[in-house]
Image: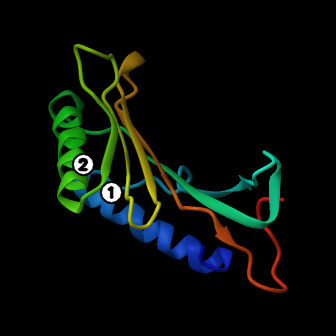
Amino acid sequence: MQTISAATLGDRLRDMSKHVYTALDVPDPIDGPTDEVTPYTCDGDNGRPREDQYGLTHWWQINDIKDFKAQFIPAVKRLKEYGERQGWEIAKFKLPPDVLDPIVVMRDPRTGYGVWVKALTGNDLKRIIARVSSPCVKVPPGGENPAT
């Protein structure tokens, strides 16, 4: 397990999000207020949070996508295809008519990064939401755990 500061891990996480965003290939920009990195705890063997480990999740969304109905299914398909080309494990991939909102969940087995992307179609939302998560890492010596 790597020892990484929250700032460095946050930079890596945002870089991974850029790859996901590029793979979606939706022309609208990421909204600033919906772009958030949050820490999470990593559980030890006893099921309790470890003080010396943490992970980060980058949440973002693309709002008010122009011509949403023509864009959202191809965007989710492009992301899945990108993940497959990268050798990622596809844990979930569903499109209408099987589900109302298209979704793709995948993980890079080499790095431990995970991706969850869903297109919200109900109530004229016209948005794609995404969560990109890092693997658990160790807190650097003398550093603080951002998740506790």
User: From mark 1 to mark 2, how far is it between C-alphas?
Assistant: 7 Å
* Residue type at numbered disc 2: Leu
- Contact (Cβ within 8 Å) of mark 1 with mark 2: yes
Name the element at disc 1.
helix
Residue 62 on image: x %, y %: 38, 45
Between 99 and 122, the residue placed more toward the observer is 99
23 vs 135, left or right, is left
Is residue 62 visible in this depiction of the protein?
A: no
* Residue drawn at the location 34% of the way across and 30% of the way down: 126
Whichever of callouts 1 and 2 sits on the residue coming sooner in the sequence is 1
Q: SS class of the residue under badge 2?
A: helix
Q: Is residue 128 left or right of residue 57?
A: left
Instruction: Report the residue at 46% width, 59% height from top.
Output: 113
Q: Amino acid at mark 1?
A: Val
The reply to whether residue 59 is in sight is yes
Residue 42 figure quarter: bottom right
Q: Residues within 10 Å of mark 1 (few under 14, many from 20)?
A: many
Query: Which quarter of the picture shows residue 55?
Result: bottom right
The number of numbered badges drawn on the structure is: 2
Residue 134 image point, x, y percent: 53, 61
Residue matched to label 1: 20
- Using the image as rendered, state which of residue 36 and residue 107 is in the foreground: 107
| Residue at 62% from the left image edge and 63% from the top image edge | 136
| Residue pointed to by mark 2 | 79
Left or right position of 48 against 129: right
Taking depth in this image into account, of 115 and 52 the one nearest to the observer is: 52
